[in-house]
Amino acid sequence: MAWMPPLHILLSPITADTGATIEQIQLKPLFYAPQKEALARAGDDEDDQFFELAKLATGLSVKELDQLKRPDYVSIAQYVHDMSTRPASYFLEALGEVANEPSESLTTEQVQLLLPLDAAGRALTSVTLEMPALRATKVMKKLTTAKERAEFITSHCTGLMIPDLAGLTVPDWTELQERIDDFLNKPAAFFRSATSK
């Protein structure tokens, strides 16, 4: 069973821009590139950030969102928060699916994606994550911004092209960042003990 975003039944229906009544909202997954753009538009204000992400997660216009009663908005904000901060494994485990399979190699890991990623004309349901070589981390450290460094090392460790990363869901991006952070900061003994369990 594939993961699907939840359907939110509104406590209080709203009026669509078309004049129709909206009684429920099929929430949408957040994707890495649109989320990054929405956060840049919103600036540093957390309320503005959540509002921009709520537009992405609901597909509603500003006028439609402004009609939401606070409890409905809080429910949507909670979904946005989970999509923005939780790794894909959180959502996959809720389905009862094993998120990531240990590989035979200590230096690679198969990471299951929340939603398929279209990369190079193929729909990937998982990516092989490989530990970065020291030379790659040296190149990464020379890049200007944290986003550039994260995108470079993610591309290097997954074999995906940087433009392909835009199609990852935010939870997939988060999952990969957690794993890559382990690769960058944990000693070899951490990985040996993880595979012996």
Image: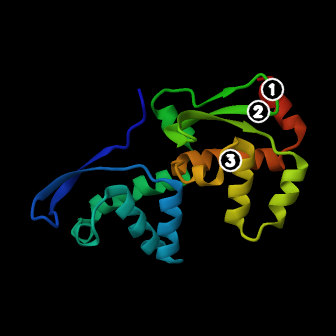
- The quadrant of the image that shows the N terminus is top left
Q: Residue at x 70, y 57 (%)?
A: 150
Residue 172 as seen in the image, left or right of residue 151: left
Q: Secondary structure at mark 2?
A: strand
Mark 3 vs mark 1: give the one in front. Answer: 1
Examine the rendering and report whether any part of residue 75 can be seen: no
Question: Which image quadrant for residue 67?
Answer: bottom left
Residue 66 in view of the camera = yes
User: Is 129 on the left or on the right of 120, as rendered?
Assistant: right
Q: Which residue is mark 3?
A: 178
The residue labelled by disc 1 is: 105
Q: Residues within 10 Å of mark 2 (few under 14, many from 20)?
A: some
The mark closer to the camera, 2 or 3, is: 2
Dots 2 and 1: beta carbons under 8 Å?
yes
Residue displayed at 55% across by 37% down: 113
- Give the mark, 2 or 3, whose residue is nearer the N terminus: 2
Q: Which residue is mark 2?
A: 108
Separation of residues labelled 2 and 1 (CA atoms): 6 Å
* Depth order, front residue of 107/99: 107
Residue 121, compared with residue 58, is above or below; it is above
x, y percent for residue 60: 28, 62
Q: Secondary structure at mark 1?
A: loop
Q: Residue furthest front?
A: 121
Image x and y of residue 82, in percent: 48, 51
Q: Judge the density around disc 3: few (<14), some (14-19), many (≥20) Cα neighbours within 10 Å.
A: few
Q: What amino acid is found at the position of numbered circle 1 in the picture?
A: Ser
